Amino acid sequence: MQSYDIVVIGGGPAGLAAAAEAKRSGVDSILILERDHELGGILNQCIHNGFGLHTFKEELTGPEYAKRFMDQVFELGIEYKLNTMVMDITDSKVVTAMNKTDGMFQIQAKAVILAMGCRERPRGALNIPGYRPAGIFSAGTAQRLVNIEGYLPGREVVILGSGDIGLIMARRMTLEGAKVKVVAELMPYSGGLKRNIVQCLDDYGIPLKLSHTVVDIEGKERVTGITIAEVGPDMKPIPGTEEYYSCDTLLLSVGLLPENELSKTAGVELSTITSGPVVNDALETSVEGIFACGNVLHVHDLVDFVSQEAANAGKNAAKYVKEGRVASNKEIKINAVDGVRYTVPCTIRPDQMDDTVTVRFRVGKVFKNSAVTMYFGDEQVLKRKKQIMAPGEMEQVVIDKKKLAEYGDISDITIKIESV
Ligand SMILES: Cc1cc2nc3c(=O)[nH]c(=O)nc-3n(C[C@H](O)[C@H](O)[C@H](O)COP(=O)(O)OP(=O)(O)OC[C@H]3O[C@@H](n4cnc5c(N)ncnc54)[C@H](O)[C@@H]3O)c2cc1C
């Protein structure tokens, strides 16, 4: 069996940034395993601009952003294997993978970094009535068809779900000559970034119907029309509100799910909210020496945050390889309550944490004129007013090690949304 100090699963932006930072932190023996024929992950099909504003203070396309991190990996001489599917990881960090040249092979790793990204929720998860005609695509599949394969999936389009990929595809299909008739969103708010609603829908006069869902798909061989209806507070369609749109294509942008099958085989504890691993401030999972970052940990809004988080995972994995696990005398739980759905990380080790730890989270609904508050024990240590907070945009707070130490023996930190 071959052995490496760190094996990174997935060569998307998270895997690339994690590997590069691990190498810069002094670990040489690193291998990235990627199932696709190229590095860069899903960004290779995201040819629109808007990437990298935080990291590079420039507006890059997805492939340009990915290239910057690929170049770091090449310059640092980090090994990688393409067309290689990881099939299994054990809790003792034996990685089983397969490709055409090596066949099935196993690697013993000292540390593993999970960076497998996420996948789209399929139609099967939605229970929409109707036949199974051609013309129904996930927004990501349509994005790949248009941007990489060079096919236009349809000419008259209805989109269900207002996640960022759906919004981006509304504009993309329009620019390619298709007519996007409507975007229907089940929730009373969009699941995407405000900037994407403005730049991808409003700028092209594409209507967004909130609190609406698809109730019927017409067509046997190919989609011929879609009926949408308004939903009530119980999320059930309201009779009499049906609207019919003739179209040949339905795009689904109804959520992303972290790709955690391998995390499960490794015995990693998963969050019931994010479906990603439960991690501490080092982004270490419940299995010693297995770290997680990027969309496999929680679905991000901006790739810049993926890269920051992944660099942190890479640094901590390198520390683990060099020093082993340093026992921590305490772990403080972070409670996500009153509008905060979850936090990443879920726990903080006050004696082991970095000088500052960024805690990222999403809110569960739209909040106007409210405040993000943080409590160390019972004491409020942060109150940051925000005009608007929405589930489509990630929020963050920073925990300062010195400040935390002033609060002595607290057992928990609480983050919530309060009115001002
Ligand atoms: C369809 C789609 C479209 C998107 N479009 C946009 C967009 O337009 N704008 C935007 O800001 N964000 C977009 N995102 C979000 C974007 O995915 C993230 O910002 C970022 O790419 C996450 O990086 P990552 O490395 O965690 O995941 P990914 O980029 O998904 O990379 C994960 C990598 O892991 C590999 N992998 C997975 N399982 C295995 C395995 N078992 N063995 C080997 N390799 C494996 C995958 O092949 C992939 O290359 C999109 C996401 C999806 C799913």
Image (tube, rainbow, N blue to C red):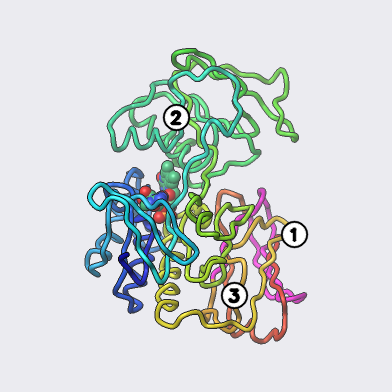
Q: Which residues are magenta?
A: 358-387
Residue on which disc 2 sits: 137
Give the Cα distance between marks 3 and 2.
42 Å
Q: Quadrant of the N terminus?
A: bottom left
Between discs 3 and 2, the one toward the N terminus: 2
Front-most of residues 98 and 135 = 98
Q: Position of residue 87 (x, y in %)?
A: 41, 51
Front-most of residues 263 and 383 = 263
Front-most of residues 326 and 152 = 326
Q: Magenta-highlighted stretch: main secondary structure?
A: strand
For image coordinates 46% across by 58% down, the residue present is 294
Residue on which disc 3 sits: 399
Q: Is mark 1 within 8 Å of ligand 1?
A: no
Vertical arrangement, residue 178 with respect to residue 407, above or below: above
Q: Position of residue 213 (x, y in %)?
A: 62, 28
Give the Cα distance between marks 3 and 1.
22 Å
Vertical arrangement, residue 223 with respect to residue 214, above or below: above
Q: Nearer the viewer, mark 3 or mark 1?
A: 3
Q: Position of residue 390 (x, y in %)?
A: 61, 50
Identity, as a three-letter code, of the amino acid under mark 2 = Phe
Identity, as a three-letter code, of the amino acid under mark 3 = Ile
Callout 3: SS:
strand
Confirm whether residue 410 shows in the render. Answer: yes
Label number found at residue 419: 1
Identity, as a three-letter code, of the amino acid under mark 1 = Ser
